[in-house]
Image (spheres, grey):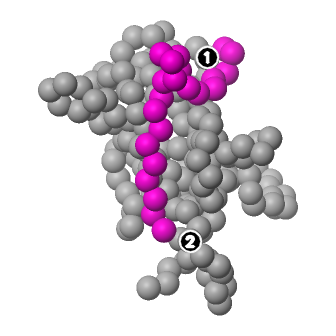
Amino acid sequence: MKADISFETKCIAYLCARSEHEKQPRLAPATGFFWRHGGKTYLVTNRHVVTGRYANNQPLKDGFDPLFLDAHFYQKSGQARQGYTPVELKRIRKTLYKNCEPDWIEHPDDRNFDVVAIELCESLDVYAVNDKEQHDEIWLEAGADCFVVGYPERLTGPALTPIWKRA
């Protein structure tokens, strides 16, 4: 079956922060996206997703200290044919700590920026947001349409695609 999935949709990853607790594993869904910089690929998400904490270091309501991050995303799988590039849904697990230290990059002023970048060492053929040339001239004004793409409240579209919300 062929389906037309937008470039932006393929850049988004469904994330699940995980804890391997002795009694019961804890899970927390989230959204991320891919970005390339300096020949490396990064998964970008919110800081509270990987720490389970607010900026003041207090635990989130129902929060926990995640040890792993599972990322579900679309990866290229073959050559383009008749204008379509085959994709497959893939999952990777990223360990969030290396030698007991966080294995992510965050803004030096981490208390005011709820964002981290996680370097992906795997050779993944992902769609990164900045892979697409942006030639559009965008005129922003009050009342202009904006779209937010992600997985709010554990919601997904068909085949684990993200939800697009017009704002």
Say if residue 5 shows up in the picture: no
- Asked if 107 appears above or below 138 in the picture, the reply is above
Query: Residue 84, percent across and down?
Result: 61, 81
Secondary element at tag 2: loop
Query: Residue 54, percent across and down?
Result: 45, 17
Query: Residue 116, percent across and down?
Result: 59, 30
Task: Determine if the magenta segment contains residue 38.
Answer: no
Callout 1 environment at 10 Å: few (<14), some (14 to 19), or many (20+)?
A: some
Task: Determine if the magenta segment contains residue 89.
Answer: yes
Secondary element at tag 1: loop
Give whichever of 140, 80 is nearer the camera. Answer: 80
At horizontal 65% and vertical 90% (from top left) the residue drawn is 82
- Badges 2 and 1: C-beta atoms under 8 Å apart? no
Separation (CA) of disc 2 from disc 1: 37 Å
Say if residue 159 shows up in the picture: yes
Give the amino acid at mark 2: Ser
Q: Earlier in the sequence, mark 2 or mark 1?
A: 2
Find the residue positioned furthest to the left.
23
In this picture, residue 7 sits left or right of residue 47: right
* Main SS class of the magenta portion in the image: strand
* Residue hosting label 1: 110
Give whichever of 41, 139 is nearer the camera. Answer: 41
Query: Residue 23, percent across and down?
Result: 14, 26
At horizontal 48% and vertical 29% (from top left) the residue drawn is 96
At horizontal 75% and vertical 60% (from top left) the residue drawn is 132
Mark number for residue 77? 2
Callout 2 environment at 10 Å: few (<14), some (14 to 19), or many (20+)?
A: few
At horizontal 46% and vertical 48% (from top left) the residue drawn is 92
Indicate the quadrant containing the N terminus: top left, top right, bottom left or bottom right.
Answer: bottom left
State the extent of the magenta-drawn residues as a range. 88-109
Find the residue positioned furthest to the bottom.
82
